[in-house]
Every structure is written in C-alpha cells, then in structure tokens.
Image (spheres, helix red, strand yellow):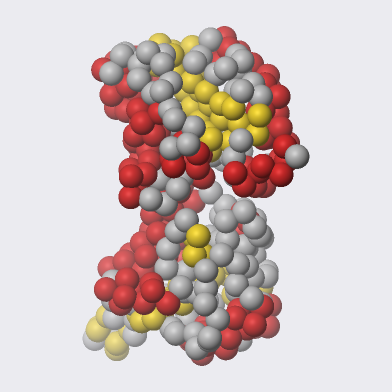
Amino acid sequence: MRIAVVKETREGEKRVALSPSVALQFIKKGYSCQVESQAGYASNFSNEAYEEAGCTIITDKAQLISSADIVVKVNALSDDEIAQLKTGAVCISYMYHLFSPDLVKALAAKGVSAFSMDAMPRISRAQNMDALSSQNNLAGYKAVILGADTLAKIFPLMMTAAGTITPSRVLIFGAGVAGLQAIATAKRLGAIVEVTDVRPETKEQVESLGGKYIEVKSEETVKVEGGYAKEVSAAYLEKQKEAVNKSLAQADLVITTALVAGKRAPVLISEEQVKMMKLGSVIVDMAVEQGGNCALSEKDKTVVKHGVTLVGISNLPSTLAQNASELYAKNVFNFLTHLSTSEKMNWELDEDITKGTLITHQGNIVHPSLQTANQ
C-alpha cells in the first residue's frame, strides 16, 4: 500500500500529515511512503529526515497523488488534487463535511473512499485516533499564551518592594478539550480562573483543575451527542449571559471555545457585553473559524473594539506546527492501521469508527448525516 503525504496549500498552514518518525512506523509495517518535497519544512521536518526514515521524496505533485493508494493531508484536498486521485483511492484529512457539500460531491464523483478526521466518533476505542482532541489540546494551551502575551499585565500574584500585583482573572467559555487545557495552563501561570459550560457534568472536571465553575440555573436539559453539546435554546443562552456577566466585567482575559457540530458557533458575548468589559482586557475567540463566540471577532485578525482586544486566529494548532504535526500523524497512524494492513484495506462498513468517518465510497455519499444528499 502506497501512502502519499501531500504538502498543505491552505494559507498560513504549517502542519504536515505525517512526521518522519510516524512515516518510519508505517514503513516498518510494510507500507510505502512517498512525500511531496518540502511538505514538512514548515513543521521543522526536512526532506532528509523523511529520506532517513525510508520515504521517497517526490517533486511532481500530480505524479505523487495519481500513483497513491492512500493520500493523507491535514486540510481537505483541493479541486486540482481531487482530480489527480485515481479511482478507488483512499484519502484521509479534515473535511468538515457538513459545511462542505461541494467537496463531498467532488470526492464522490471521483469514486474515492474519503475519510474525515474531524468526524471521529467520541468512543474509547477511537481516543488515540481523535485528531480534534489532540489539536484542540494544543490550541487551548496556545490561546492562554496568546492572551498572556497580549495583556498589559502579568498572570500571577507578585509581591514586590513597590507593592503587590494582584493575579489576573481569566474567564473560559467551554470545558471541552481546549477549555480544560486552557484552565490548566492559566492556573499554572498563576491566574484566577472561572469557567462556564452548558454541560453541568463538566463542573467536577473544572474544579479538579482548580477552576471555579459558574453554574447556570435552568430547567433545560442540554443534550450531548457523540461527546459534543448540541445546540441550546436562546433562553438558555440568555440565562448563561446573566450568570457570567459579573465575571465577564471583572475578567482580564476571556477565552471562548464553544462549538456545535455542523453548525455556526453560538454567540456567547454580544457587543453590549464587550462594552461592559474592562479597558485593556482581551478576548481570544477560538471559535472564530465557525463564526465566532463573540459578536465582534474577526477571522484571522486582532482588533480593538470598545477598548477590548479581540484575537481571532482561526488555526491555532498551526502555530505549534511541530507538536501538532507529530500528534496528528500519530492519530493518522492509529486510524489507518485500524482500517488496513500494508497489503489492503480491510475495514467493515458497519463498524463504528469506519461508519463514523467514511464520507464517500464507491461513488456514493455514505455518511449517515449526509444521507439526504442521496435522495
């Protein structure tokens, strides 16, 4: 089985789908790895490092893709790359299939088996394949570092001869993977951390990391599907705003992480709420790529509105490309060795992991969430 590692073309993307060390693991299992020249350069992996691992470096992308049994990327394939795939090939990447109908149709029309890493089911057997978690973990860390760098004050309590500096206050929306890492990082830096989440069961996790959980008093039951919170009502969001407004007004740094699978990110901070924040405070909106949790965030921009700095970097894992690539590559390795041997693909279409991630197969759109597209 021939694996092709394609250089990312998304603007600002520094990650690569396989690191040399993981490519070596594939080669030891009998797979062949071909890597587009300079694919790993932005992640600090040289062509020579891949060659030392046993990979072949290819300069002609069309040749690389057209000869591959399996094509791996971080971001979805471009139209040109899809056109170069051979019928029956397998491609693995992030696809965000619910937001990308044209991409899904193009992959189905090409007759390839397309697997979406962002659709990995949240089950125990798939934990070591869960790229969203591995990347969000890094993003939660980096969000705090960015916020700390942007603030005009320090995080920890500091007692000096000139007086005492009080610790910064950090408010985090969402206690998923990114939020929990943000809590841990902010606490390590010495901040006072408060957290709100629509799922009351996260209270114990928040408090175990030293954060204070802000409870939203509501009779509404928040539904969780596949490990993700489903969309909540406008009435609930209004109650959440009321519960957090005091903390929001006191916060030096706010980090928002709330996403709803397949839908626009919920707006958790309105312009009126931004106006009530302290002069010089900072919001790092981690949901900006899906519309943002703050009404004033701008994608891939840092802007100042009403005296508050809003940081809207849409691809935080790419800013930690070396670690992010290493973790993503391990996710791909665990996933691909689950789906195949070095001789052939051996998945079962009704198996949970395969069914949850397979988007197109043999010319059809097969993912359960997209079945209406076939009708």
Residue at position x 64%, y 76% from top?
A: 233
Residue 61 occupies which quadrant of the picture? top right
Quadrant of the drawing holding the N terminus: top left
**Rendered position, 220 above or below 300:** below
**Rendered position, 256 above or below 343:** below
- Residue 83 at x, y = what percent? 68, 19
Residue 171 occupies which quadrant of the picture? bottom left
Residue at position x 28%, y 68% from top?
A: 188
With 222 as the anchor, is 288 left or right in this view?
Answer: right
Residue 172 occupies which quadrant of the picture? bottom left
With 250 as the anchor, is 327 left or right in this view?
Answer: left
Residue at position x 31%, y 14% from top?
A: 30
Of residues 63 and 282, the one nearer the viewer is: 63
Q: Residue furthest right?
A: 375
With 300 as the anchor, is 15 left or right in this view?
Answer: left
Total numbered badges shown on the rendered structure: 0
**One can see residue 323 in this view:** no
- Residue 129 at x, y = what percent? 38, 41
